[in-house]
Amino acid sequence: MFSKSRINEPGPKQGEDVKKPEASAAKPAMPKSPAPDFAASASKPKPPASVLSSDLTVTGNLKTSGDIQIEGTVEGDIRAHLLTVGETAMIKGEVIADDVVVNGRIVGRVRGLKVRLTSTARVEGDIIHKTIAIESGAHFEGSVQRADDPLATGAKTPLPTGSSQSSAAVSKATAAAKGE
């Protein structure tokens, strides 16, 4: 709408030509305001994914706020932002990540906002997720359960639908037995 009204306005007067360069000088100032935001993010770039090569075996837990790509063997729990399990990888433990892409083998629980099992994936354990994709050819033994927040610590043992009502009933029964 603003451009239409400017088009319909009469051409600039001679006195306004002097103001127009100031206006055009002000226009480049506008891109400068996003530049500090870009500069701030450029000063702290996202680090590349940590890679555990195929000849590496780790015994213990791994925790990062960044990305991890596993090609070797990990015996322990892993917590990351993005976890990529390579085709040669073997993980024995719980996996917790925002995004989990499984190309290799996991023996243990998988908890993630987005979980993807590719055709070469082998998972033996429960998957708690917000969204999941399982490609044809993936091998999976366990249960799959959707949760709004699968990363929450209480998501380890999610309750089936209606369990909150039965928990309330148990609480009432316990209170009645105590004479409350």
Image (tube, rainbow, N blue to C red):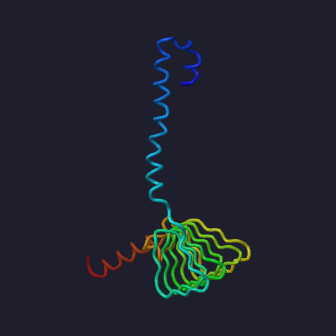
**Going 35% across and 78% down the picture, which residue do you hit?**
173
The residue nearer to you, when weighing 31 against 101, is: 31
- In this rendering, the count of numbered labels is 0
Quarter containing the C terminus: bottom left
Corner quadrant of residue 100:
bottom right
Quarter containing the N terminus: top right
Corner quadrant of residue 99:
bottom right
**Looking at the picture, how far across and down is residue 130, in whole percent?**
55, 66
Q: Is residue 20 above or below residue 29?
A: above
The residue nearer to you, when weighing 49 against 128, is: 49
**Looking at the picture, how far across and down is residue 18, in whole percent?**
47, 18
**Going 49% across and 34% down the picture, which residue do you hit?**
28
**Going 50% across and 62% down the picture, which residue do you hit?**
46
**Looking at the picture, how far across and down is residue 64, in whole percent?**
46, 72
Q: Is residue 31 above or below residue 179?
A: above
- Which residue is situated farthest in the right direction here? 137
The residue nearer to you, when weighing 6 against 14, is: 14
Left or right of 119 on screen, residue 123: left
The residue nearer to you, when weighing 108 against 170, is: 108
**Going 45% across and 48% down the picture, which residue do you hit?**
37
**Looking at the picture, how far across and down is residue 67, in whole percent?**
53, 69
